[in-house]
């Protein structure tokens, strides 16, 4: 998993509440178990019309936000089903951080496991960042996980909270497999001793 330390990028505003996982990645795109290739279908029903033409009014189709790496959204982001394809699609598009007043629990935890930093902030702070994000190509925000700060385009700083264990995993690029491999020496020692004491197993 890619490490997350400091991210400086364009923030896209998505001022919608209750954005569910079917809006993030519709069910017809869940046939794959690959984590790549889903970015093109992120927010598919909002990004394209019935003929697969881009909707020019959708934020991620606007020239200023096509390279967005941060998403500022409304409350209860990622609600609905627990599909892990939702964070896969977000990351494959290029977004590494989602900021909102609240998230659905399963989606929130899946983000950390896939190298995405979900940040919960009070509504007034989200409103400020949403306003910053409306600046288009000038909506550059810096997210520093180590110091747990967000710096807006005007230089203002917002502090955010994050679970210490989840922070450790993101800073070091550790998913569940990576966490297990940190203990590989202890695992090898245990297996060697077990083989000696129970050779018949």
Image: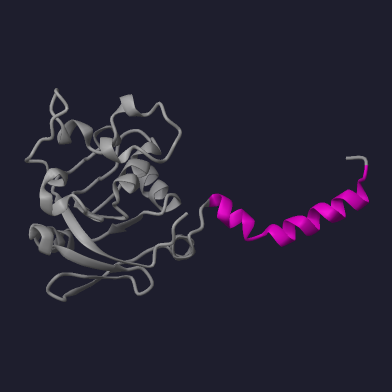
| Above or below, comparing residue 150 to residue 38 in the picture | below
Query: What's the residue at 15%, 31% (across, down)?
Result: 48
Residue at x 39%, y 43% (from the top left corner): 106
- In the image, is 196 to the left or to the right of 48? right
Q: Which residues are magenta?
A: 176-199
How many tags in the picture? 0
> Which quadrant: the C terminus?
top right
Q: Is residue 44 above or below residue 149?
A: above
Q: At 12% from the left edge and 54% from the top edge, which residue is drawn?
A: 64
Do we see residue 122 in this rendering? Answer: no
Q: Position of residue 166 (x, y in %)?
A: 45, 60
Res 8 quadrant in image: bottom left
Does residue 198 show up magenta in the picture?
yes
Percent x, y of residue 122: 21, 61
Q: Position of residue 28 (x, y in %)?
A: 32, 24
Residue 126 at x, y = what percent? Answer: 17, 59
Between 49 and 174, which is closer to the camera in this rendering?
Answer: 49
Q: Is residue 47 magenta?
A: no
How was this image coloured? one colour
* Vertical side of 41 occupied by 162: above or below: below
Please say whether residue 139 is visible from this viewpoint: yes
Q: Main secondary structure of the magenta part?
A: helix
Residue 63 left/right relative to 160: left
């Amino acid at each position: 998993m890619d490490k997350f330390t400091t991210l400086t990028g364009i923030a896209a505003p998505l001022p919608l509440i209750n954005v569910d996982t079917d809006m993030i990645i519709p069910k017809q795109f869940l046939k794959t178990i690959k984590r790549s290739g889903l970015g093109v279908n992120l927010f598919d029903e909002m990004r394209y019309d019935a003929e697969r033409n881009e909707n020019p009014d959708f934020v991620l189709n606007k020239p200023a936000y096509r390279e967005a790496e941060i998403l500022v959204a409304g409350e209860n982001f990622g609600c609905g089903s627990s599909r892990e394809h939702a964070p896969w699609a977000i990351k494959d598009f290029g977004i590494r951080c989602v900021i909102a007043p609240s998230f659905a629990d399963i989606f929130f935890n899946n983000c950390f496991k896939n190298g995405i930093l979900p940040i919960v902030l009070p509504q007034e702070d989200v409103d400020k960042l949403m306003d910053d994000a409306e600046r288009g190509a000038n909506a550059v925000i810096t997210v520093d996980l180590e110091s747990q700060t967000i710096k807006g385009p005007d230089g203002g700083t917002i502090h955010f909270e994050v679970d210490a264990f989840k922070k450790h995993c993101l800073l070091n690029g550790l998913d569940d497999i990576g966490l297990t491999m940190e203990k590989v020496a202890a695992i090898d020692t245990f297996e060697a001793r077990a083989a000696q004491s129970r050779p018949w197993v």
